[in-house]
Image (tube, rainbow, N blue to C red):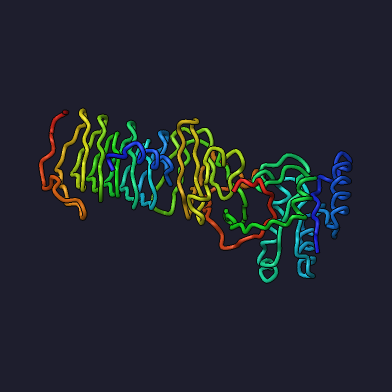
Amino acid sequence: MHLYIYDDFLSKSRYNKVLSKIETRLTDLGLSGKIIRLNNLKNSDKAIKEEIKQGAKTIVAVGNDYTISKVLNVVMDNDLNYFSKDIVISFIPTSSSSLAESFGLINAQQACDVLLARRIKDVRLGKCLNNYFLSNIKILGNNTEILINKNYQITLLKNKSCYIINIPTKELSKKIPNIREKNQEKLFLFIENSNQDYSFFPADNIELKKQANISLIADHCITCQTPTEISLSEKRVRFIVGKNRAF
Amino acid sequence: MFGNKEKNLEKIKDAETIIGGSIKVKGNFHGKGNIIVEGSLEGSLKTDASLLVGEKAKISANVLAKDAFVNGSITGNVKIEKDLFIGKTAKITGDISCEQVSIEKGAIINGNFIMSPASSDKGQERGSEKAPQAKK
């Protein structure tokens, strides 16, 4: 059974048209299912968990990067350990989304077709304290000190952008081709100063000390605090992906 | 290795780890794949594969690698399992051991050289020799 989780912002009238198109397409494809709206996160969490316990196997987040992140963190909750191994997650983006691009989802219409094709990829999740992340964590700040594998420390003297990558976005995969072929079970720290000057480190464990002038953004939407420890989680999620995914 | 220098350099460009010019690394850096160092590193550096040290790189560490192309500065002992290429901009202060070495004119080396015999190649120059102390 398909369970569609609509984000709160989709209740605004300007999204009526796109939702109507999605619903028509899903009906045409025979993929109709139950809908839960994330208007009250606490109640929505409970409702999603209840549906999963009652047999929902395909969970489809409808919205933006934040929606998929919220859904992911509910599905990965320890309460659902027994059920989560059978769950497949999918995503229908209602606007442009970096995460959707990573998974080969171009727009809402095409994402419905991808849902039907059901090409499933096993994805190991990253973990930043209590939050799971799919794609990457962006580090914003200067003179940042990063401890890798508890062995060596990197100091960013000056940097343009710094990412901890689990699954690369389309943009990052152009800069670092074949990233997943380099090492299957690692996170990657990518630091770019200019096109000619960049650094790249595979890592099992990344620590950031408490620093006042630094912020971390996971999956383009969740802010994490320092000090923090980032690593690959033992948890995996089965994700429905498009042909043109970035990994 | 030296006959295919360009090919090997191209291969190492697809490195597992790249330490860029704007990065400072401190600690014990142990890798399994190819490593490129363009920035600065203090501590120890070890890899099971090849190492490329860029012209502007500054390494203050004992270095252990399978093969190495050195164009920057290393202060510490350099132990290379197979082949070592020392470029004209290289500056090494420390003892060096390797199986085969190629040194370009202009390289500065202060330390002892220990050449260990290759397991398969025969008839090549072997032994221990004192490296040139002054700029070539």
Residue at image point 38% right, 42% down: B12
Would you say residue A222 is visible in this rendering?
A: no
Residue A121 falls left or right of residue B113: right
Please tell me which residue is depicted at 25% across the width and 51% down the height of the picture: B81
Q: Is residue A57 visible?
A: yes
Residue positioned 36% across, 39% down in the render: B7
Left/right placement of residue B50 relative to residue A166 reads left
A126 versus B71 height, above or below:
below
User: In the visual, does B108 lie left or right of A95?
Assistant: left
Position of residue B109 measured from the top left corner of the image (x, y, whole percent): 18, 35
Q: Which of A147 and A24 lies nearest the eye of the viewer?
A: A24
Residue A174's spot in the image, x, y percent?
A: 56, 38
The quarter of the picture where residue A125 lies is bottom right
Compared to residue A194, the image places residue A58 above or below, namely below
Q: Position of residue B115 (x, y in %)?
A: 16, 47
> Looking at the image, which residue is at 46% across and 31% down?
A196
**Residue A49: which quarter of the image?**
bottom right
Q: How many marks?
A: 0
Quarter of the figure with the N terminus of chain A: bottom right
Describe residue A143's horizontal placement relative to residue B78 as left or right.
Answer: right
**Residue closest to the eye, B123 or B133:** B123
* Residue A5, position as x, y percentages in the image: 79, 55
Vertical placement of B42 versus A120: above or below?
Answer: above
Q: B83 or A89: nearer the eye? A: B83
Q: Nearer the viewer, residue A78 or A83?
A: A83
